Image: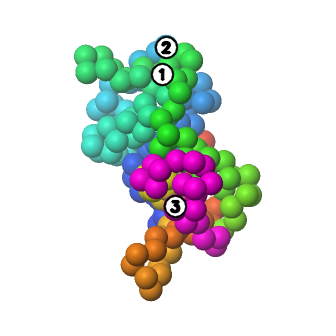
């Protein structure tokens, strides 16, 4: 079982691994995911963490959830929610080198740049923080929230789960 890095939470790791497995074809479009208990066991996470990860993937438009059936991989991804869009943009900017390790990011400045509300930008940053891309920057002013980009080793995910 893989353990989360110091910057990455269990939910962030599960979300990233499932996202990668869906993108690589491990789980096919229009197919249900394995039973939740089995999937949680494969990922080495609890049911609550798995439900949160699936909630994120649903918000990203990757899976469809139902109260009566297992989550299904969407054949055509749905439009992601604004929070998921912010988190995706942050992932892309870190992966593409636009944001570099040690660089400070202000959710308020990000909100202004993207034309989204501060709560949406903060929630997108929170997802990125849980996935290990960002961590809190300790400031002497509690009224200012800033984050800093983590080193790549903090968020590199395995290609598959054993």
Residue 29 image point, x, y percent: 53, 17
Query: Which label belongs to residue 73?
Result: 1
The residue segment tinted magenta is 102-120
Residue found 55% across the figure and 23% down from its top: 77
Residue found 56% across the figure and 18% down from its top: 76
| Residue marked by disc 3 | 107
Of helix, strand and loop, which one carries label 1? strand
Label 1 and label 3: CA atoms lie apart by: 31 Å
Q: Residue furthest right?
A: 97
Q: Residue furthest bottom?
A: 140
Pointer 1 or 3: first along the chain: 1
Judged by depth in the image, the label closer to the viewer, 3 or 2, is: 3
- For residue 132, side relative to residue 56 (left or right): right
Residue 38 image point, x, y percent: 33, 31
Corner quadrant of residue 35? top left
Residue 116 belongs to magenta span: yes
| Residue marked by disc 2 | 30
């Amino acid at each position: 079982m893989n353990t989360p890095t110091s910057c990455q939470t269990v939910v962030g790791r599960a979300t990233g691994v499932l996202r990668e497995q869906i993108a690589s074809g491990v789980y096919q479009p229009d197919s249900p995911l394995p039973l939740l208990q089995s999937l949680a066991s494969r990922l080495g996470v609890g049911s609550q963490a798995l439900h949160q990860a699936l909630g994120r993937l649903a918000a990203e438009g990757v899976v469809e959830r139902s109260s009566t059936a297992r989550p299904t991989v969407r054949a055509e991804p749905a439009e992601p929610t604004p929070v998921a869009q912010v988190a995706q943009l942050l992932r892309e900017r870190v992966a593409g080198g636009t944001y570099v390790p040690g660089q400070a990011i202000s959710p308020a400045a990000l909100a202004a740049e993207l034309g989204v509300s501060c709560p949406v930008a903060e929630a997108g940053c929170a997802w990125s923080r849980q996935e290990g891309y960002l961590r809190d920057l300790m400031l002497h002013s509690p009224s200012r929230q800033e984050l800093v980009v983590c080193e790549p080793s903090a968020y590199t995910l395995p290609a598959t789960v054993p």
